[in-house]
Image (tube, rainbow, N blue to C red):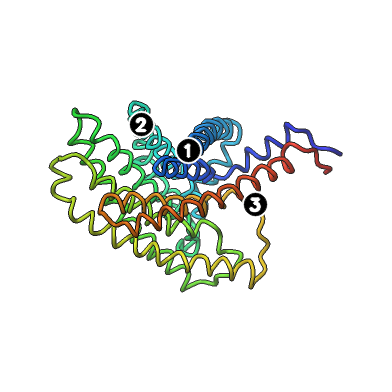
Amino acid sequence: MTSTLRSRAGSAVEGLTPGYFALVMASGILSAGFHLRGFLLLSHVLLAVCATAYVVLLVLNGVRFARFRHAVASDFRDPQRAFGFFTFVAGTNVLGVRLAIEGHPGWTAGLLVVSGLTWLVLGYVIPWTAVLGHEERPVVRHANGTWFIWVVASQSVAAAAASLEPVYTTGRRELALLAVTSWSVGCFLYASAGVIVALRLMLYPFGPEELTPPYWVSMGALAITVLAGARIVDMADAPMVDVTRGLIAGLAVVVWAFATWLIPVLVAAGWWRHVVRRVPLTYQPTLWSIVFPLGMYAVAGIHLGEADHLPLVEGIGATELWVAAGAWLVVAVAMVRHLALTVLLPRRA
């Protein structure tokens, strides 16, 4: 018996992962990187993919909430999936920052309002529903790489606010306050998430099946911290900026160094998972959680090199940009193939 296209699409929407906005994040940050390097055609193509994916995912999540509310509620209560909802915040701001580069600060401001409010709401709701309200104890055994997405969301708010601050005279102090505050919150959240995830790795059994792609977000969270810090350093003068500019500039370099150190560790972990332990490498939406950190590391290096006059760092970022682009292409092809086989083509039950 052949399943219908409608039923297959319904099943796909019901099982839609909360973290799928990582596709928007990956496409948007690569678009920004290619714009910085002068590859405008590539940049505009990726911007179109970013904006289209954002709209499509908004519609799909709206349908999921309307028709499969039980699945959404289940995700909010699951400490292994709930933090994926923060990809909406980060994806919204990545798109907004890219539109600011294109000369559309009004869109950036509107998207920042949406993402900022969502960041505040989710920042209180998800820790309660997924962690404090979780009946099974200890919750730390369920911690994974998705917890670092909360950090990414915080730093994306900082990056968007810092992009707007030089543009608007009215509200400049408020935007500076928002940028520095959310950047600082993100730094403390990274320390908290790092401790919790490290405890999970040391205290509980950990096999190759559990070493999922979102662990790359541990590096991506550092990279976006560097990018947001470089943006803050470049902001126009404001009381909050003047007080913290030197501190943030120095910390951004330190964080970039740690992010660089993490990359070989993550590559070695992937080798252990797929080559040594032979876990099959198949498409899953969380693979975008690898592409985004690679792209963010590249763009962060380019911005940091320009802001702090570090040509070596800028050169490393420019080289990494092509590595991230290759990863984006591979995952995009795998995604299209996966959707064709699971949704578009008929299957026999």
Q: Earlier in the sequence, mark 3 or mark 1?
A: 1
What residue does disc 1 label? 43
What residue does disc 3 label? 283
In the picture, the disc for residue 108 is 2
Residue type marked 3: Tyr
Q: Residue at x 72, y 43 (%)?
A: 342
Q: Residue at x 66, y 42 (%)?
A: 336
**Residue 90 lies in quadrant:** top left
Measured from the top left, where is residue 22 in percent x and y?
50, 45
Q: Earlier in the sequence, mark 3 or mark 2?
A: 2
Disc 1 packing (10 Å; few <14; some 14–19; many ≥20): many
Q: Secondary structure at mark 3?
A: loop
Whether tag 3 and tag 1 are in contact, CB under 8 A, the answer is no
Measured from the top left, where is residue 305 in percent x and y?
31, 53
Q: Is residue 263 above or below residue 323?
A: below
How far apart marks 3 and 1 lie (CA) works out to 25 Å
Q: Residue at x 63, y 37 (%)?
A: 13
